[in-house]
């Protein structure tokens, strides 16, 4: 049967690819569940008990649409950040917000700069609006700020994506370097600063709110999906100058952020003790993963995130074989998709029970591969 | 401070209007909560206890991203509809899915037809992608199928929106009339058939699945927000021929539907006894609202939805005064936005306690207005 004949030329041009294959898809293909879920940088340490309480309470009124202004959460975020709440917009995860900023800026042919191997969902959105993506290689396993800036200038880019700390490598730049990068950009280039892993980073890696607060061409994206442990709830936020941020309201799905997600995020933000507890667990788990890697002669890359990327010290085929060995033993992990990053595997921090399963599966896999 | 200077011309052209002002915004302005929430066609009868159980259970793993394929829910919906699950896409409410279909078809200047006074969020999306909206007046308080068809042909419309049963009037066309309308459309016009209120309608008003199943230019949108009582969970779905439906995957936010929403919708779909229980309550509540309206000499318009639209039998100013009187007494309702529909007010069905508050507030308001 033919499809409808009048999709836009852009829609017709899009490939049927998806940014990520979920672990559930792999489980269905395998015919069994994973025993360890260490591939999506979720927080296996879980959300705060206070969050579970908030969800349970709010479930009774899940028949009510949520506040489309996300008022209470925005007020709390504004207070948390020290910014007027009008400078914050909440969305269906950073993914949803990335789609909106791309839509607001990108038309067919608009040049956009990112790093080669950086977040695929950003690239998915850029392709979805017809942008021309220019990807700059990593340098020494870090996003290359100088090369990104050079590409922005050369291509007259309207958007540049920077993740700090970075995914999939876990590396970071200093607050000073990020601030200098932002200030060096042309005023006609929007910096999409993805700080999904900001909570796990050292303070010295994250520019203060004030450092970038008055720049109309900087937007900082944060999420409750990582350290706060609410990936399934779909709550992210973005902040910047009000004149820029307010543009999201013209195109966003106003009722898109679910009621239980708003309540959960609000409870999570209020429970900074739980966050501190999780951060300690992340740090301990990172050390443990690094030690396991080193026991095989691999090189854990220092990480400011809730995962550890491990240089398996050989080629991409070897790293892929390691990944396959882990997955076949029920340990869900992922690895970077492009060279030279794809000599590595990436392990999310998690409860010791799951890290133990990773340790055992890795030992078996390494022994098998020789 | 100036905004970023390089938003698209389309983005710059968009007004800062929003489709709906939520009741929470009105509550903040009033300085107190509403005592009755009868304005958003939510289900005050609540979700099934089995849904609350599912949410409570799933809350423990809300740290996990949801399955981006929405596999279990799509399988269940496919079985429920008697369609291959590949013919179903789940999204962040019908609102989110409407945004996607508009994006796939509408470019600046693309002609789109809807009814004058129909769902504002559809219009918001059409404007957001630069479409040229042509609105056809209602006829006898129903969407005018003949006039819609005429407008589609005259304008060479790429999209036409039809809600059956209709919001904000609650009226409907027969399954035969809707089917004939769909079949009379040019193959180059996509029918967006919004069946948000399908569960509350008589079977004779809803085309069978088979009646429209093989049409590449028909998409049927349904939701868990109304009769199923999950408005806050943000789960809607769309079905049609696979070749058409599959286009959503090229642009959707793959991880956009939250985990608890997927679990809640799955539980709700399985609990058809609860749905039947709610439908009986909706019917009783509709009768009660109609009787209250008639006691004041107003004319309740027969409804196939979970709300009753009441013709106040005078002008728009009078209907607005009635609405203001109710709202000032803490009873949240809405009214149609355009003439001649705006001689009416719209009351959602709900628990008798809230309907009693509506009755009292209406009597006081009518007496006050004289």
Image: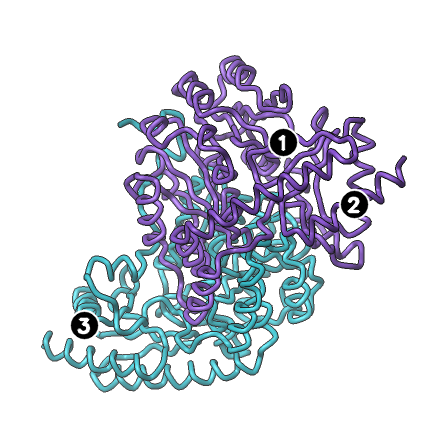
Chain colours: A cyan, B purple
Give the chain letter at badge 1: B
Q: Which mark is residue B169?
A: 1
Q: Which mark is residue A49?
A: none
Q: Which residue is mark 2?
A: B326
Give the chain letter at badge 2: B
Who's the residue at 58% across and 57% down the image? A90
Number of other residues with Cα within 10 Å of mark 2, as a class: few under 14, some 14 to 19, many 20 or more: many
- Left or right: A143 in relation to B279: left
Q: Position of residue B29 (x, y in %)?
A: 79, 54
Mark 3 vs mark 1: in front: 1
Who's the residue at 29% across and 66% down the image? A334
**Camera-nearest residue between A45 and A51:** A51
Q: Which mark is residue A329?
A: 3
Do marks 2 and 1 share a chain? yes
User: Is mark 3 in CB contact (under 8 Å) with mark 2?
Assistant: no
Q: Position of residue B310 (x, y in %)?
A: 70, 33
User: Is mark 3 in CB contact (under 8 Å) with mark 1?
Assistant: no
**Camera-nearest residue between B316 and B128:** B316
Q: Secondary structure at mark 2?
A: helix
Number of other residues with Cα within 10 Å of mark 3, as a class: few under 14, some 14 to 19, many 20 or more: some
- Left or right: B248 in relation to A252: left
Mark 3 vs mark 2: in front: 2
* Image quarter hosting the C terminus of chain B: top right
Who's the residue at 68% across and 42% down the image? B16
Up/down of A286 relative to A103, above or below: below
Q: Position of residue A109 (x, y in %)?
A: 45, 38
- Left or right: A246 in relation to A311: right
């Amino acid at each position: 049967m033919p499809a409808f004949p009048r999709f836009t030329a852009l829609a017709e041009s899009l490939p049927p690819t998806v940014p990520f294959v979920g672990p559930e898809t792999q489980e269905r293909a395998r015919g069994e569940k994973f025993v360890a879920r260490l591939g999506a940088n979720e927080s296996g340490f879980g959300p705060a008990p206070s969050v579970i309480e908030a969800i349970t309470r709010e479930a009774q009124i899940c028949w009510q649409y949520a506040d489309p202004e996300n008022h209470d959460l925005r007020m709390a975020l504004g207070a948390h950040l020290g910014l007027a709440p009008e400078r914050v917009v909440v969305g269906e995860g950073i993914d949803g917000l990335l789609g909106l900023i791309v839509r607001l800026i990108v038309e067919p042919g608009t040049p956009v700069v990112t790093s080669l191997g950086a977040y695929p969902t950003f690239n998915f959105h850029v392709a979805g609006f017809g942008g021309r993506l220019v990807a700059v290689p990593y340098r020494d396993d870090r996003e290359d700020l100088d090369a990104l800036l050079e590409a922005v200038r050369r291509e007259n880019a309207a958007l540049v994506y920077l993740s700090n700390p970075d995914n999939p490598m876990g590396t970071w730049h200093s607050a000073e370097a990020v601030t200098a990068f932002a200030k060096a950009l042309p005023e006609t280039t929007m910096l999409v600063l993805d700080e999904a892993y900001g909570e796990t980073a050292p303070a010295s890696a994250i520019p203060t709110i004030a450092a970038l607060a008055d720049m109309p061409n900087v937007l900082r994206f944060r999420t409750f999906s990582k350290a706060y442990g609410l990936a399934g709830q779909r709550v992210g936020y973005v902040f910047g100058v009000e004149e820029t941020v307010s543009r999201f309201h013209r195109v966003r799905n106003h009722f898109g952020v679910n009621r239980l997600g708003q309540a959960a995020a609000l409870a999570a933000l209020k429970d900074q003790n739980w966050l501190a507890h999780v951060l300690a667990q992340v740090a301990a788990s990172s050390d443990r993963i690094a030690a396991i890697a080193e026991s095989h002669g691999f090189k854990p890359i220092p990480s400011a995130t809730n995962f550890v990327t491990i240089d398996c010290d050989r080629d991409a085929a070897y790293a892929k074989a390691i990944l396959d060995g882990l997955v076949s033993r029920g340990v869900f992990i992922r690895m970077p998709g492009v060279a030279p990053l794809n000599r590595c595997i990436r392990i999310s921090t998690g409860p010791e029970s799951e890290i133990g399963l990773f340790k055992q599966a890795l030992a078996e896999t390494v022994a098998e591969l020789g």
